[in-house]
Amino acid sequence: MQVFKKFCLFAIIGLLMGCRSSVITSDGAVYDSISEINEAAFEAPQSFRVGVLLPLSGNDARYGIGLKQAMLMALDDMNNPNLILQFYDTQSSPQMALNAAQKALKQKAQMIIGPLTGNEVEIISNITKQNNIPVVAFSTNSNVLQNQVYSLGLLVEEQVSRIMNYAIKKGRSKFALLIPDNSTGLTVAKAAVKATTGGPAKIVKIAFYQPDTNDFSEIIKQLSDYDNRSAEINKQKVFLKQQIKQGNLDAKKSLQKLELKDTSKGVDFDAVLIPESGAQLKSAAAMFGYYDVFAPEVKFLGTSVWENTRLNKESTLVGSWYPAMSKTHIAYFNKKYHSLFGEYPQSLYAFAYDAVALCSAIARNNSSNINAAITNEDGFVGISGMFRILPDGKNEHSLDIIEVTSNGDIIIDPAPKKFSTFIPETSLDIAALYYNDFPPQILGKNQKQAEQQIFGKTLGNQYSPSINEFSFPF
């Protein structure tokens, strides 16, 4: 396995160009000049045939074509005549994905790359497992992943784990979550609970919002407990005004200072995770400022989707942290992709490149146990840094921690150079037990319903006590 790992590193960064001796089949259709049918290749004794299931037509064709182009680029770089890619069009449809998988198996594919969506992965998994053919898909829907059905996509769980563990390491211990009321939000919540189970940190509040909203005023008002925080200072202002009427000059000076504040105390959390991007992220950030929630008292945290939004002009978010794929070799990838195809690639396309590099390593080493090769615990060096695929279908990427600054985003904690040993995943049963006495306060959703969805059970108390009442059992 060590030889296998070393070759993968060499194959990805070797950048060999000009050789197109690998055979690419495309299920009877010619998509470009180097995608030609060669049935004789099916009989080549040393060849390693990989069925590639992509949406080359239909609603998702833009992504499918981009993924294919990245794979063709990787194929040139790998310079491996034993690797055969057989392309099949899923037509952006789960049923057509199943048809494509059946054709790939009929044409002796030993491994499947793709498809793109969770629905497509789910529908093909039965026949691929029956035929003992591993799948390395691009879907980030962890619900469809299992042994022999893997993903290279960047999963929400590992992003949440990376950013929260870093924040805990830097002294943050009382977390709030502002999440969409959908499957993504629940995935974030479960991952955040697991990241804090058994340690010194706690999730104290979880606030749900409608996924399509741009109005965060009410939910952040509740999350920040603004009414209670402002009530005390308003009482002080009323008292000082009465004192001024009675001629107290010192009261006038005190009131002038208080007029600059809307609240007299901080919030009961010291970090808030917002897995949002674009206009919604900016709108939420503005509302936190409106309700007197600022850094550095509160550290704002994000996921990799923050990378798609320019945040250096958002004063509330300056100093915030989020995880991102390593930029190890991405400059090369972007430049070459642009030179070949006339456009810059989406971040998703780097996974397609890494998938081909993985297949090339398997082909060169003639691995008899493909699943064991795929799940090599040492991991591999990809175009976006280290990654490894886990036996349960999930994966880990070596992620940078990025800080938002007024001059642009900077790396403050580089992606680790190697993975730690496997750590047993915390079960939701253990997490529920851990949180049973101090469940997080739920906002924007029924408390018991949310607890059932996140923990798999209703917890002991109706809501969390205020942070001033917290007494952690460790």
Image: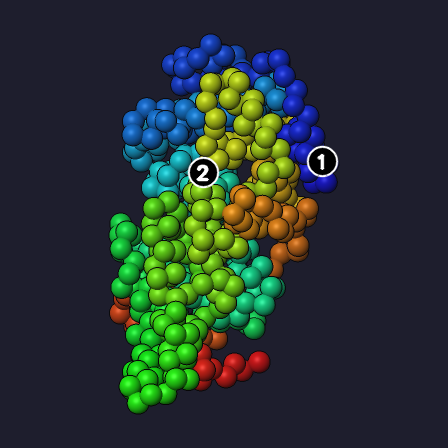
For disc 2, the neighbor class at 10 Å (few under 14, some 14 to 19, many from 20) is many
Label 2 and label 1: CA atoms lie apart by 24 Å
For disc 1, the neighbor class at 10 Å (few under 14, some 14 to 19, many from 20) is few
Q: Amino acid at mark 1?
A: Lys
Q: Is residue 186 above or below residue 105?
A: below
Q: Is residue 85 above or below residue 160?
A: above
- Circle 1 is placed at which residue position? 6
- Circle 2 is placed at which residue position? 138
Q: Amino acid at mark 2?
A: Phe
> Which quadrant is home to the N terminus?
top right
Q: Indicate the quadrant where residue 10 lies.
A: top right
Indicate left or right for 380 with 254 as reference. Answer: right
Q: Residue at the spot x=44%, y=42% of the render?
A: 310
How many callouts does the rendering have?
2
| Residue 249 visible in rendering | yes
Q: Position of residue 27 (x, y in %)?
A: 40, 18
